[in-house]
Image: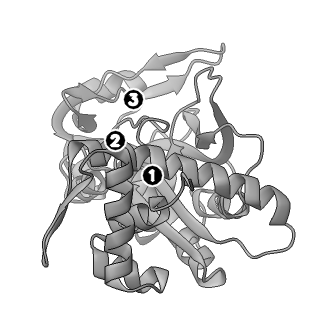
Amino acid sequence: MDRLAGIQEFVAVVDAGGFSAAAQKLHLSRSAVGKAIARLEERLGVRLCHRTTRAFQLTSDGHAFYEHCVRILAELDIAENAMTSDKEQPAGRLRLSVPVIFGRRCVAPVIADIARQYSELRFDVSFTDRPVDLIDESYDLVVRNSALPDSAVLTARRIARQRMTICAAPAYLAARGTPRNIEDIAEHDSIVYGRDGNTRSWVFPNGKGGTYTAPARSRLILDDLEAAADMAVAGMGLAWLPCWLIRERVHSGTLVRVLPDIEPLVFDTFAVWPKAPFMPARLRVLIDALASRLPGMTGADGEIKSAA
């Protein structure tokens, strides 16, 4: 018995969202795909999906089986790539999770270039700031703006550095005054990043290996950094943002840095993926491209620099 029979067809139907699209991708007839999945269901003794001529929907068993199938096919890809990675172009599917703004502004352009270079690569990208479980949610790679905790099942590589800075609109500073030290921040309105009831503190190195927190008074709490930058441009208060995000606004004069001589927090951005004996060529190409390209977007040390 071929225990893999029907699995590729099943995953293709789920990924494509229907039988016709999957059949076209697999270069099979719709009937052949449907029969392969029917035989798979018969062998398993469960219903994997509900389907009509117009609709396709996974059952709860189908959802669980799909996650296992994706991992099985990924392991097969790893084994095959170990034998052929030096002989073939990167190919296959990569499922990624990236932060919303950093992902859109910095990671997405790299993905676009890789996709143009390798026509056999497919990308499934989720833009979210929520914590994700890389293993349970079957991601091939996640990009995260925090250090990787000790893990026996994950591997990480630093791909960028982000330098934080306080900024404000010239009109706001003209009306409210410019802070002369960290303590002055408490007298100002602040635009703060927050999500799910938690806000991000404005943190600075203390010169002794630790950090201290600026006394920011959060008048506006937003879960979108781009919106926070826009609010700062509108004169709504001080904001603590990554230098790469406000670089163009600083160069155009719509924002200015506040307390630029104070040592900023610089934090690392990591690519994280499951540990495996072999790395698929498609994953290695993407990670190498991110590590090569992102420092040019964020600055080698996250600094504000001219785009020229």
Residue type at numbered disc 3: Trp
Q: Which residue is mark 1?
A: 98
Identified at 14% across, 78% down, the residue is 53
Please tell me how crowded label 3 is: few (under 14), some (14-19), or many (20+) other residues with Cα within 10 Å. Answer: many
Look at the image and name its color scheme: one colour
Q: Report helix, strand or loop for mark 1.
A: strand
How far, Cα to Cα, is label 2 from label 1?
24 Å
How far, Cα to Cα, is label 3 from label 1?
23 Å
Identified at 27% across, 41% down, the residue is 177
> In which quadrant of the rendered view does residue 223 lie?
top left
262 w.r.t. 152: above or below: below
180 w.r.t. 85: above or below: above
Mark 3 or 1: in front is 1
Q: Position of residue 292 (x, y in %)?
A: 72, 61
**Position of 72 compared to 155: left or right?**
left
Q: Position of residue 282 (x, y in %)?
A: 67, 64
- Tell me how many marks there are: 3
Q: Which residue is mark 3?
A: 202
Q: Position of residue 233 (x, y in %)?
A: 26, 59
Q: Report helix, strand or loop for mark 2.
A: helix
Q: Earlier in the sequence, mark 3 or mark 1?
A: 1
Mark 2 or 1: in front is 2
Q: Which residue is mark 2?
A: 64
Q: Nearer the viewer, residue 61 or 35?
A: 35
261 w.r.t. 115: above or below: above
Residue type at numbered disc 1: Val
